[in-house]
Amino acid sequence: MAKGTVAPRSSSRAASCACGALRVTALGAPEIVNACSCFDCQKRSGSAFTYTAFFPNDAVRIEGEARPYRETRSAGRWHEVRFCANCGVGVVSLLEVFPHLTGVAVGCFGDPSFESPGGFYWAARRHRWLPAPDGVRVVEEQ
């Protein structure tokens, strides 16, 4: 789907962990798509950043056994990630700041044409080899 294109509410996307035991179906277009290079996201993902699509809670169906991990971030709000109980991949994110949204790790969709992020947060903490993406709003801190 091209950047800026809105998926009809009736369209669905499927995401899953590496082993397929934790599955997510999301209806329609995400309300927010973000990338983040804060140290918490780097440690949680084991990578240089996270890339998450946030859908309305009622547009997301989660199937399979998930284990939650909740922490309080430096801004004082909690962030919960739900990992597959079998393979350990973090698929779902819940944030106190977005109580009406459910985040899904974009890589779990297996769709290289997924929308680009609308924002790249904590760019000041990105790995130096990682350039700020062209055409994406860059926020040095949050």
Image (cartoon, helix red, strand yellow):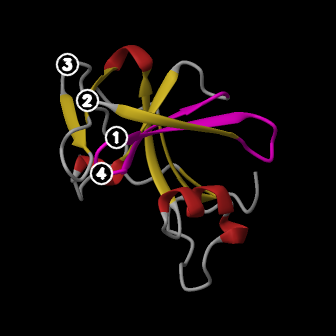
Asked if 95 appears above or below 3 in the picture, the reply is: above
User: In the rendering, at what x and y percent does residue 15 appear?
Assistant: 24, 41
Q: Which mark is on residue 64?
A: 2
Asked if 16 appears above or below 7 in the picture, the reply is: below
Give the secondary structure at mark 4: loop
Mark 2 crowdedness (10 Å alpha carbons): few <14, some 14-19, many ≥20: few
Task: Tell me the magenta residue range.
Answer: 72-96
Q: CA distance from mark 1 to mark 3?
A: 30 Å
Amino acid under label 2? Gly
Residue contact between numbered discs 1 and 2, judged by CB atoms under 8 Å: yes
Disc on the earlier residue, 1 or 3: 3
Q: Which residue is mark 4?
A: 87
Disc on the earlier residue, 4 or 2: 2
Residue contact between numbered discs 4 and 1, judged by CB atoms under 8 Å: no
Q: Is residue 2 visible?
A: no
**Going 40% across and 54% down the picture, which residue do you hit?**
116
Amino acid under label 1? Ala
Give the secondary structure at mark 2: loop
Position of residue 8 in the picture relative to residue 56 (left or right): left
Disc on the earlier residue, 3 or 2: 3
Residue contact between numbered discs 3 and 4, judged by CB atoms under 8 Å: no
Q: CA distance from mark 1 to mark 2?
A: 9 Å
Q: Quadrant of residue 98?
A: top right
